[in-house]
Image (cartoon, grey):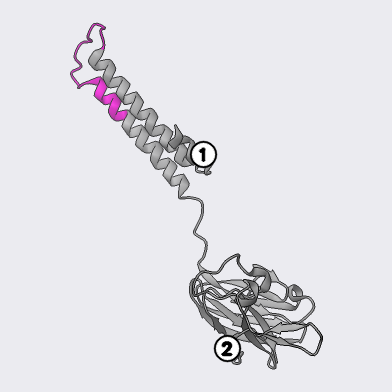
């Protein structure tokens, strides 16, 4: 009973129905065979075409097989699998990033799946694609040729005088020891955070390392060994 209830709780109604059908067929076959072997009623005359009990069992098994085949066919007909791909990251400088940034993949407009402050991320299927990026705040645009694989992340920029800079925030965010520098303001100290990379060749897509977190608001609760917690900001 627990094996039947657990798939229903998990949302797998077809699996629960399949288990129920199998149990029902096994019970029916067992009861049919038991009735033929232990029955006290007067035996029926032999059927020249064969035993009717075994014929019923065969028909029952065939019906169960057809039902299970139909259930598995329904479970596999939920639609094609989601396309695999990566993300294209853009750091905007205008006051309205979601309106200022226009991105098209193979002449098709793409909506961002992530919007954190001035950081936008756009999904793109795996493979080679032509990408058009425009920033209305500076009236600048560029065409890119990207070749992306599953799970990869690329940075695109349209600003000729600005380059993205990746800064490691893990020391600040998780309270790890970091060097601090006193400022001219009394009682004000700043922490020196390491620069992971400076992306100066903005004419081409910039590959980002796996596991990098690109916005302060997206930092996870904990970091796995070897991963980085970073922000991506445009600097001259």
Closer mark to the observer between disc 2 and disc 1: 1
Judged by its main secondary structure, the magenta piece is loop
Q: Residue 168 is drawn in which quadrant?
A: bottom right
Q: Position of residue 164 (x, y in %)?
A: 64, 86
Query: Does dot 2 land on a helix, a strand or a loop?
Result: loop
Q: How many marks?
A: 2
Question: Mark 2 highlights which residue?
Answer: 204
Q: Say above or below: 105 vs 30.
A: below
Residue 121's quadrant in the figure?
bottom right
Q: Residue 49 falls in which quadrant of the image?
A: top left
Q: Say above or below: 54 vs 36.
A: below
For the residue carrying disc 1, how many other residues have a C-alpha within 10 Å: few (<14), some (14-19), or many (20+)? some
Is residue 109 among what the camera can see? no
Q: Which mark is residue 8?
A: 1
Dot 1 lies on which element?
Answer: helix
Magenta residues, start to end: 39-59
Question: Which of these two is toward me, 201 or 68?
Answer: 201
Left or right placement of residue 161 versus residue 177 in this view: right
Left or right of residue 145: residue 135: right
Residue 155 visible to the viewer: yes
Q: Is residue 223 above or below residue 10?
A: below
Front residue (pair 187, 159) = 187
- Report x, y in % for residue 188: 78, 83
The residue carrying pointer 2 sits among few (fewer than 14), some (14 to 19) or many (20 or more) residues within 10 Å by Cα, namely some
| Residue beneath the point at 62% across and 82% down | 167
- Identified at 31% across, 29% down, the residue is 59
Asked whether the residues under the numbered discs 2 and 1 touch, taking CB atoms below 8 Å apart as contact, a structural biologist would say no
Where residue 61 sits in the image (x, y, percent)?
Answer: 32, 32
Q: Which badge, 2 or 1, comes first in the chain's sequence?
A: 1
């Amino acid at each position: 009973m627990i094996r039947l209830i657990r798939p229903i709780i998990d949302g797998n109604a077809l699996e629960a129905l399949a288990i129920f059908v199998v149990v029902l067929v096994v019970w029916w076959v067992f009861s049919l065979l038991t009735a033929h072997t232990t029955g006290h009623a007067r035996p029926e005359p032999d059927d020249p075409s064969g035993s009717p009990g075994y014929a019923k069992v065969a028909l029952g098994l065939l019906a169960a097989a057809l039902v299970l085949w139909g259930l598995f066919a329904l479970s596999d007909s939920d639609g094609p699998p989601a396309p695999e791909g990566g993300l294209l990251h853009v750091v905007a400088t205008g006051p309205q990033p979601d309106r200022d940034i226009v991105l098209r993949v193979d002449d098709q407009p793409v909506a961002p799946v992530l919007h954190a402050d001035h950081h936008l991320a756009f999904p793109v299927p795996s493979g080679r694609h032509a990408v058009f990026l425009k920033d209305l705040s500076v009236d600048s645009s560029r065409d890119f040729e990207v070749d992306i694989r599953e799970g990869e992340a690329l940075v695109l920029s349209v600003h000729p005088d600005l380059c993205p800079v990746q800064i490691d925030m893990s020391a600040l965010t998780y309270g790890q020891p970091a060097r601090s520098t006193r400022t001219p303001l009394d009682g004000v100290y700043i922490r020196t955070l390491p620069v992971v990379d400076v992306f100066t060749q903005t004419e081409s897509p910039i590959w980002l390392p796996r596991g990098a977190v690109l916005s302060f608001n997206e930092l996870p609760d904990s970091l796995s060994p070897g991963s980085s917690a970073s922000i991506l900001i445009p600097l001259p």
